[in-house]
Amino acid sequence: MKTKLQRRSVQASAVLLTIAVAAGVSGCQDSRAASVDSASTPEVNIIVGGLEKVIYMPAKLAEGLGLFEKEGVKVNLLGEQSGATAENSLLTGNAQGVEGFYDHTIDLQAKGQCITSVVQLANIPGEAEVVSTSKAGTITTAADFEGRNLGITSLGSSTDFLTQALAGQAGVKSYTPAKVGAGQTFIAAMDNNGIDAGMTTDPTIAQLVETGKGKVMIDMRTEEGTRKALGGLYPAASVYMSCDFVQKNPQTVQKVVNAFVGALRFINSHSAAEIAAKMPKEYANAGQALYEKSINDTKTMFNKDGKMDADGARNVLSILDKYSTNVKGKGSSIDLSKTYTTAFADKVPAEK
């Protein structure tokens, strides 16, 4: 009989196979996108690992503020609930960029792919481990994950990586990762006892706490909480693209980065209410006040300049090398200089 960890290994292998197939067809797709810079108005598809998640709000905010249009680039924002699914779209050439966690660039390099973060939106995850209120008395630290059902968006997602890290640091030998997505599917899984605890973001966190269904156990929405949980910064939300696309289309990439940094500046200089007013109305489906609270609880995670913290990048590699199924043991072969660049953020015009 397979143990939980063995079953997990089989599941992870299936994900790797999917990525390998995607990578195999990526060559011809990339060549079609190589001349984007030559268009009068370049067009770029960016997959977002959850458009409604507050940690990824710079994309829709940039759109709402008209920043892409101002830069002269047409950006199509396409939503996915998982970063793992989003990266497949990038590898197959169906998208030119992903707004997702930086750790995917390291994970993909371990699989032979060159992906780089062109603008770093945050140096902390903006995630929290939320425990079901009914289990809060028995699950108080990561050490209590042993034998539990833990919610993640999907296998191979950043919530999966972070859960592996928290469990590994606590010496947990076995738990069951449960693919429950985000938002209402995550809440339903907790309502139905499908998960005992799980890794999620705002506005889901705010909804669970407000309704009394969940309690925040490990909070990585602040620098202090992130350092306590992970021993340092953990650069997370970013926009990453294939190295080939970046090299062939620097003008288009610069336009995209300019727009995202513009959104970061708006976040850092405006109130949660002012930010919420620029976001799609349907994102406040649990009420405007709660949505504004979720933005306020998370907004301090965002960078002001779109640049990577180098020590943070090294910490991400160190954590993945110890606890990630895909990266473990390969850390010494990872070239961090290929996983991110500050070249474009360095060239963003100063605020007027």
Image (cartoon, rainbow, N blue to C red):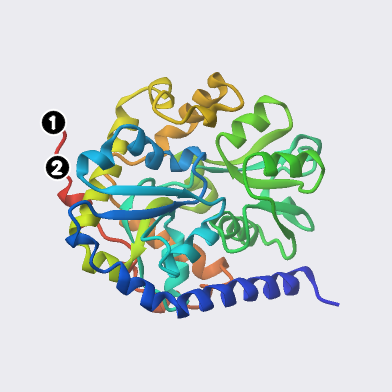
Query: What is the crowding at mark 1: few (fewer than 14 residues within 10 Å), some, or many (at least 20)?
Result: few
Residue shown at the point (64%, 71%) measured from the top left:
12
Query: Residue flagged by tag 2: what amino acid is it?
Result: Pro
Measured from the top left, where is residue 214 in percent x and y?
71, 34
Measured from the top left, where is residue 191 in percent x and y?
78, 38
Residue shown at the point (46%, 65%) measured from the top left:
318
Q: Quadrant of residue 349?
A: top left
Vertical placement of 180 versus 133: above or below?
below
Alpha carbons under labels 2 and 1: distance apart:
9 Å
For the question of whether residue 261 can be seen, the reply is no
Residue shown at the point (70%, 26%) measured from the top left:
211
Query: Residue flagged by tag 1: what amino acid is it?
Result: Lys
Residue situated in front as seen by the camera: 291 or 173: 291
Dividing the image into 4 quarters, which one contains the C terminus? top left
* Number of marks in picture: 2
Measured from the top left, where is residue 232 in percent x and y?
44, 52
Q: Which residue is mark 1?
A: 352
Q: Residue 349 has which mark? A: 2
